[in-house]
Image (tube, rainbow, N blue to C red):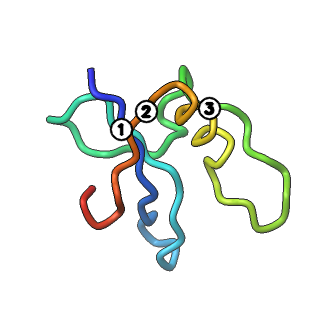
Amino acid sequence: MVKQISWLPLKNENGRKILHLRTDPHRPWQPYTAFPEYAVPDIEVAGASKGYATFQKLISQGWQVVATHRA
């Protein structure tokens, strides 16, 4: 299993980026909300990125960050 995270734009959201995860290199990236086993509740702060709390958790667990342009 790979453990990769990346900030990717959501379709129909004017380029707004949210956290995406990938656990299999042969499957497409999916929003963090598609992985309830890894996601944690979002931070309730105006302007906070969707998935930032999950990002912090996964970084501390050794997940690899993949640049947007490489994902």
Residue labelled with disc 3: 57
Q: Nearer the viewer, residue 43 or 34?
A: 43
Q: Amino acid at mark 3?
A: Lys
Residue at 73% from the left image edge and 36% from the top image edge = 41
Residue labelled with disc 2: 63
Badge 1, how many Cα within 10 Å: few under 14, some, many 20+?
Answer: many
Cα separation, mark 1 vs mark 2, equals 6 Å
Return the x and y of residue 22 as percentages of the image width and height. Answer: 33, 37
Q: Amino acid at mark 1?
A: Gln
Residue labelled with disc 1: 4
Mark earlier in primary sequence (1, 3): 1
Return the x and y of residue 53 as percentages of the image width and height. Answer: 68, 41
Return the x and y of residue 60 as percentages of the image width and height. Answer: 58, 30
Up-down relation of residue 37 to residue 12 (above or below)? above
Q: Which type of secondary structure does the marked residue at label 1 adopt?
A: strand
Mark earlier in primary sequence (3, 2): 3
Lateral position of residue 57 relative to residue 6, left or right:
right
Residue at 84% from the left image edge and 51% from the top image edge = 44
Cα separation, mark 3 vs mark 2, equals 9 Å
Mark 1 touching mark 2, by CB under 8 A? yes
Mark earlier in primary sequence (1, 2): 1
Lateral position of residue 33 relative to residue 42, left or right:
left
Q: Amino acid at mark 2?
A: Trp
